Amino acid sequence: MKLLAVLALLVFAGAAAGQGGEGGGGALPFAVGAAPAGCDVGRGEWVRDGAARPSYHEWECPYIQPQLTCQAHGRPDKGYQGWRWQPRACSLPSFNATLMLEMLRGKRMLFVGDSLHRGQYVSLLCLLHRAIPDAGKSFETVGALSVFRAKDYDATIEFYWAPMLAESNSDDAAVERRADDRLIRGAPMDKHSRFWKGADVLVFNSYLGWVAGGDKIQILRGADDDMSKDIVEMKAEEAYRLVLFQVVRWLEHNVDPKKSRVFFVTASPTHEDSTAWGDDAAEGGNCYNQTSPISDASSYRGSTSREMQRVTAEVLATSRVPVGVLNITQLSEYRRDAHTQIYRKQSAEPTAEQRADPRSYADCTHWCLPGVPDTWNELLYWKLFFPSNDQVL
């Protein structure tokens, strides 16, 4: 009965697919319908929804890394799990795991990016896995590549670790590096991009590594294996522009837009300074102990680099392969309450001084699961299956 219901939805929605979608030229691959005209999902608010949230429970999803399991690490509140994003002019379609799996039958979906993007990937696995019996799924990680298999659907949903997209000295996630010690190779991209070939849905993200170590970054020029010579220093945003152009050129040579879809997820914001949302009394305050979203957007000064966002928009606009841009930045800026704070597996045991001031080691970058990344995947679901004529959400 569930399959029949999904097929009926496909038939019903398919009539709308002829309305066109991002990039023009008729229906896009995977589209079963179209977004309502004039729907700007970036304008809206977070609303309480105890009936639909959380979409799953932390304890029932085996794919969540211990760095994101906030309840298991002692977070005393669960309020951050109960919010749903509500656009003002329209509503997002409900996430249907069976529909998504049917549409991915025989396909390969690949996420490429950093630890925040991996959180979105894991969130998607959590949203999907209950629709698959235990014997019908598997998960493994080998090197930089993680692969979830939905066996009955002959589908894979994968994550490839490439925090800077280009080859860099951050490629080994097990090696801790200083934020100001970033080194990337300007070209070519072969080391990473050979894993991207053949994906039917590609979802890219890269931001945090570009802004975490100041406004300069080192670039290694040429294809030599020696990562210690011919190094120049460049502004981070210009190095980012260079790498994004490399990605776009790769897409144009390797992706058939008649068969495949490409998305780019914008910057995930941090909440390191509570004065940014008007909490001037909390000297040294950040996301620690925050239990509700920011309600007054007019008083909030977000920390996300506008220059980096501008570079993203400019470069992706040059691509001859349509790139759907998922603007998660604006709606995530409100969620000061949903970061992992101190409720995560720590890479090192906090010192006595840190324990005396938990704000000093609170993680205001990554997000608890379930939580905000589930909404990112609802936007991805909408953009993939119900695209609009506007590429930017």
Image: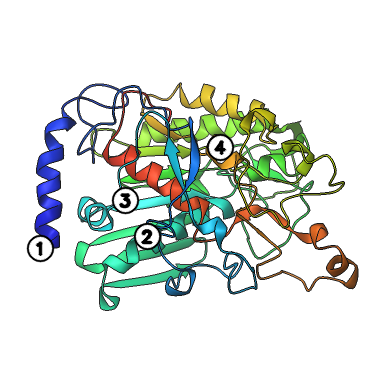
Q: Which mark is residue 59?
A: none
Label pair 1/4, CB-CB below 8 angstroms: no
Q: Residue sitting at 45 percent across and 43 percent down?
A: 85
Q: How many marks?
A: 4
Give percent across and percent down for residue 208. Answer: 65, 44
Question: Which residue has dot 1 on it?
Answer: 1
Q: Measured from the top left, where is residue 267 in percent x and y?
A: 58, 39
Residue 127: give its label.
Answer: 2
Q: Which residue of the protein is positioned furthest toward the bottom in this rendering?
A: 135
Q: Nearer the viewer, mark 1 or mark 4?
A: 1
Nearest to N terminus: mark 3 or mark 1: 1
Say whether disc 1 or disc 4 marks the residue closer to the N-terminus: 1
On the picture, is 174 further left or further right than 204?
right
CA neighbours of label 3 inside 10 A, class few (<14), some (14 to 19), many (20+) = some
| Mark 2 burial class by Cα count in 10 Å: few <14, some 14-19, many 20+ | many
- The residue positioned 45% from the left and 58% from the top of the image is 123
